[in-house]
Image: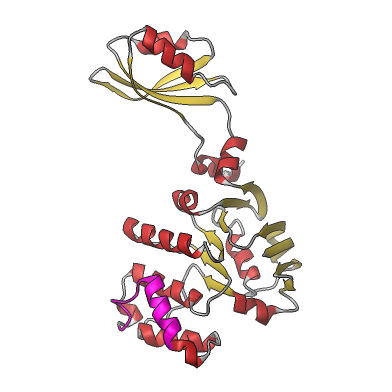
Amino acid sequence: MIKVKNLTKNYGEQKAVDNISFEVKTGEILGFLGPNGAGKTTTMRIITCYMPPNSGTVEIDGKNIFDDSLSIRKKIGYLPENAPLYMDMNTIDYLYFVMGLRGVSKKDYQKRLKDIIEICGLGSEIHKDIGELSKGFRQRVGLAQALIHEPEILILDEPTLGLDPNQIVEIRNMIKELGKEKTVILSTHILPEVEATCGRVLIINEGKIVADGTPEQLQKGFKGKEKIYIEIKSEEDVISKLKGLPGVEKVDFTAPDENDIKKLSIECRKGVDLREKIFNFSVENKWIILEMRREEKSLEEIFRLLTQSN
């Protein structure tokens, strides 16, 4: 378990991290979000013992970063935003080099190398120089160096930065598999990635925590007026009729009318679910409903609401 207690870090007069506290449980994948300059990378560097805080502390499995820095580092695999790679080194030589730095026993080198090649999908590229690899495979090598010593905790800062959509999905699936056995802190600006990967989200802005919970909890907490998306097939002017339905406050087109198919967003009073009434109303008017669903506030919308400048 990771316990962050009253953590503060200043750069001169700028307060990068402002008295934050949170915990990450064993086996949890935490999405650590925030705009540029919010304090994410600074917090991760403190957790990994890369730099000390001005005040507060971090405990990992009951050990303090000030008193047990070396033993804590052995438990952590860290992939910073710019992976620590040597472009002129051969990939397999680099992984041997990292195993030596990480204190892996030489008798375990071959087994760890075989396992990490399989986990990170490096088989076809393992004998190439790192500088010859694509961005996606360099990220895999960066992830391999973070995993090579079998850490209990993974801290990943923008692990899919610069990757194409296929590579993003591959790395995302890899992180989900690793999260079944390890504690993972994942920082990224790709919010759909967080929704697909993380069981919990922590949002930081201007050095302070502004939200903490599952994606579902955050969506419920920021629910304002109810919105319903509906597709109706009808030659009639359905908007004017729907506006007269009790509880409906606003009806807008979400796309142009095409072949008598109306794609609409219906805004209702807060806490009112009108789907059943809208369905019955449509049946009475002999409208054909092609689709109807409640619109949830996306994680991206919540992120913008919490981090936009005043």
Dividing the image into 4 quarters, which one contains the N terminus? bottom right
* Residue at (49, 86) in percent of width and height: 99
Residue 115 among those drawn in magenta: yes
45 with respect to 257 (left or right): right
Looking at this view, name the residue that lies furthest to the left: 259
The magenta span reads 110-127
Picture quarter containing residue 14?
bottom right
Determine the image quadrant of residue 269.
top right
Vertical arrangement, residue 79 with respect to residue 255, above or below: below
Residue 89 in sight here: no
In the rendered image, residue 48 lying in the magenta stretch gets the answer no
Question: Residue visible at 42% across and 16% down?
Answer: 279
Q: Is residue 148 visible?
A: yes
The one of 107 and 83 positioned closer to us in this rendering: 107
* 181 displayed left or right of 263: right
Identified at 54% across, 43% down, the residue is: 304
Measured as percent of width and height from the top left, residue 306 is found at 60, 43
Give the total of numbered labels: 0
Q: Percent from the top left, x then y, of residue 217?
A: 60, 41
